[in-house]
């Protein structure tokens, strides 16, 4: 008789308590290193999401009126708990995402940075004041919370990307409904428990797991005032158009194809090492991964490729439990097939496949979703592997004749998330930062993810909406400006005035 294994069911968290979804729909949660299902996640119905929105709405007035200093104290405590539990969170990330433990710890560290930024919320929310804008008239402006706001997040940073959103939103005085990725929902629940332990009042942060049904409910519900989305470009575009058509403020961050220019004067060992980390770290499943290396001139290209080949062949690939692993599996079987399909397509379209990761297999983990490190040379801008985001451990070399050709290429690409230049030439570096049509630029820095007191966001089809995420832009996104004009003492009489008010 087959043994029946009761899988853990990952629940929603609404109004401070955990509730299993009653929708009758669940999705399996896999360990990508083994291909085994280790949990299930409930897929919330529209009614369950509406309930979470109602709970968040009810919690809003008291939370909005809580002094910012008290909200900041919750953030301070939260930061302490996150730091103390970083290892536990990282393990939860690796369990269903598959990234290495060190990489997961790095993700947690970057999430903590955002919470540290939010500890300064009393200062960040201070407005402007002007005395005597007219006789006995003063004006002040300040930024006020919106109400219930929602976040929809991708699989690739299951702890960090939610932390880009809700700490900033709730520090500003909003209440929040989060819909995490259904593919790796474990880490977000560990972090939620810590925030509740830090003293967040019930109903301020609510988590509903789900799929399109949950997302569509958030996008159309009149009580949701703003939506933060991070994910692929087609869904980002859908979220932006649907959310804005329903009267919401929306920031929707999408996909990417990030180029790194290698100038002839660059330190090629440094550039090759940078490409290894930025191309293959987290199995290429980062929106800031470098997937295109663009060496300038034949000699630079030849030397770079010569340095890359042995490095790619020597990549240590393994499960997160292997402390020596440099990268893990990709997220699902379907994604593994998709990445391999892109490699097939690259070969078909005439790119030179220098290192082929399609047949990679790991003893004891044959059913895991691994793809070996893959390297293409002589890729052209017409090829599918150039145009589309692969989101896997596939690095392509596109050789350019000149710096200008490389810049024109990057500027013509539909995505504009991140980019980098490796050079010792300050003139070239400055011109690049000036001319490139990309939101985040690295100069001898391969993954220029802004620190938490700057803001993160791409250009072109990598971001729909007017605001980047977290940092000062996050504060602007989650608040609206109010300007008050007041006259004291109140008794000054000037009779009825029918001209447009002015201070003369
Ligand atoms: P995804 O677009 O498939 O999913 C993102 C979220 O949207 C998930 O919560 C998912 O449940 C939901 N969703 C999926 N299909 C939907 C539909 N049809 N209708 C409504 N909601 C839907 O993205 P993913 O595969 O989880 O993440 C990888 C993508 O995210 C990559 O393209 C990557 O570049 C991008 N990403 C971008 C950034 C950035 O900052 N620009 C950061 C991380 C990831």
Image (cartoon, rainbow, N blue to C red):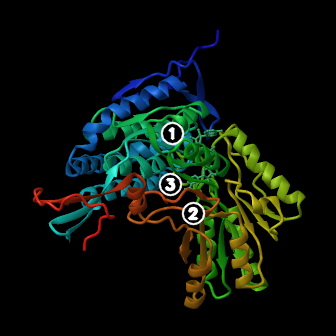
Which of label 1 and label 3 is nearer to you?
1
Q: Can you say which quadrant of the picture contains the N terminus?
A: top right
How far is the residue under mark 1 from the one under mark 2?
21 Å
| 10 Å crowding of disc 1: few (<14), some (14-19), many (20+) | many
Q: Quadrant of the C terminus?
A: bottom left
Ligand 1 within 8 Å of disc 3? The answer is no
Q: From the image, tell me which residue sits under label 1.
A: 180
Precedes in sequence: disc 1 or disc 2: 1
In the image, residue 435 lies at what x, y percent?
61, 80
Say which label, 1 or 3, has the lower sequence index.
3
- The x, y position of residue 367, in whole percent, is 69, 37
Q: Residue at x 35, y 44 (%)?
A: 174
Q: Residue 224 location, x and y as percent? A: 45, 39
Q: Nearer the viewer, residue 79 or 439?
A: 439
Q: Which quadrant holds residue 301?
A: bottom right
CA–CA distance in space, label 3 to label 2 = 23 Å
Specify whether 266 is left or right of 152.
right
138 or 152, nearer to the observer: 138
Q: Are marks 1 and 2 in contact (CB under 8 Å)?
A: no
Vertical placement of 165 versus 40: above or below?
below
Residue that mark 2 sits on: 458
**Element under disc 2:** loop
Look at discs 1 and 2 and give the one toward the viewer: 2
Q: Is mark 2 within 8 Å of ligand 1?
A: yes
Q: Secondary structure at mark 1?
A: loop
**Which residue corresponds to the image point at 71% horizontal and 50% vertical from the top-left?**
371
The dot on residue 103 is 3
Is residue 452 visible in the rendered image? The answer is: no
Q: Is residue 483 above or below residue 334?
A: below
- The answer as to whether callout 1 falls within 8 Å of ligand 1 is yes
Q: Earlier in the sequence, mark 3 or mark 2?
A: 3
Q: Residues within 10 Å of mark 2 (few under 14, many from 20)?
A: many
């Amino acid at each position: 008789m087959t043994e029946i294994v009761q899988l853990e069911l990952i629940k929603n968290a609404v109004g401070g308590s955990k509730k299993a979804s009653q929708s009758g729909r669940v999705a399996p949660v896999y360990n990508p290193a083994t291909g085994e299902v280790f949990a299930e996640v409930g897929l919330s119905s529209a009614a369950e999401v509406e309930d979470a929105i109602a709970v968040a709405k009810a919690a809003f007035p008291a939370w909005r009126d809580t002094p910012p200093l008290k909200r900041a104290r919750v953030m301070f405590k939260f930061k302490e708990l996150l730091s103390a539990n970083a290892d536990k969170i990282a393990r939860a990330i690796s369990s269903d995402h598959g990234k290495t433990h060190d990489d997961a710890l790095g993700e947690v560290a970057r999430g903590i940075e955002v919470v540290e930024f939010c500890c300064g919320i009393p200062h960040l929310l201070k407005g402007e004041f002007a005395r005597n804008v007219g006789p006995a008239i003063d004006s002040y402006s300040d930024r006020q919370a919106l109400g219930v706001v929602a976040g929809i997040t991708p699989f690739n940073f299951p702890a960090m990307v939610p932390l880009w959103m809700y700490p900033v939103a709730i520090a500003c005085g909003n209440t929040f409904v989060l819909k995490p990725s259904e593919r790796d929902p474990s880490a977000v629940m560990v972090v939620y428990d810590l925030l509740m332990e830090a003293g967040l009042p019930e109903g301020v942060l609510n988590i509903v797991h789900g799929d399109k049904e949950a997302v569509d409910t958030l996008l159309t519900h009149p009580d949701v005032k703003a939506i933060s989305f991070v994910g692929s470009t087609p869904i980002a575009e859908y979220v932006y158009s649907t959310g804005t058509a329903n009267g919401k403020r929306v920031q929707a961050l999408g996909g990417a194809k990030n180029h790194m220019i290698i100038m002839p004067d660059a330190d090629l060992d440094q550039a090759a090492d940078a490409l290894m980390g930025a191309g293959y770290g987290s199995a290429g499943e980062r929106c800031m991964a470098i997937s295109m290396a663009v060496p300038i001139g034949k000699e630079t290209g030849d030397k770079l490729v010569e340095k890359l080949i042995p490095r790619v062949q020597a990549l240590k690939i393994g499960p997160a439990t292997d402390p020596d692993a440099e990268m893990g599996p990709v997220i699902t079987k379907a994604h593994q097939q998709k990445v391999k399909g892109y490699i097939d397509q690259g070969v078909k379209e005439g790119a030179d496949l220098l290192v082929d990761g399609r047949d990679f297999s790991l003893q004891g983990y044959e059913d895991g979703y691994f793809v070996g490190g893959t390297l293409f040379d002589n890729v052209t801008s017409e090829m599918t592997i150039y145009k589309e985001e692969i989101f896997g451990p596939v690095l392509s070399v596109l050789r350019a004749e000149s710096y200008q050709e490389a810049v024109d290429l990057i500027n013509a690409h539909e995505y504009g998330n991140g980019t980098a230049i490796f050079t010792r030439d300050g003139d070239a570096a400055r011109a690049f930062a000036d001319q490139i049509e990309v939101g985040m630029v690295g100069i001898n820095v391969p993954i220029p993810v802004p620190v938490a007191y700057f803001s993160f966001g791409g250009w072109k089809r990598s971001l729909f909406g007017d605001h980047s995420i977290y940092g000062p832009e996050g504060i602007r996104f989650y608040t609206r400006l109010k300007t008050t004009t007041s006259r004291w003492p109140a008794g000054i009489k000037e009779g009825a005035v029918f001209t447009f008010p002015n201070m003369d």
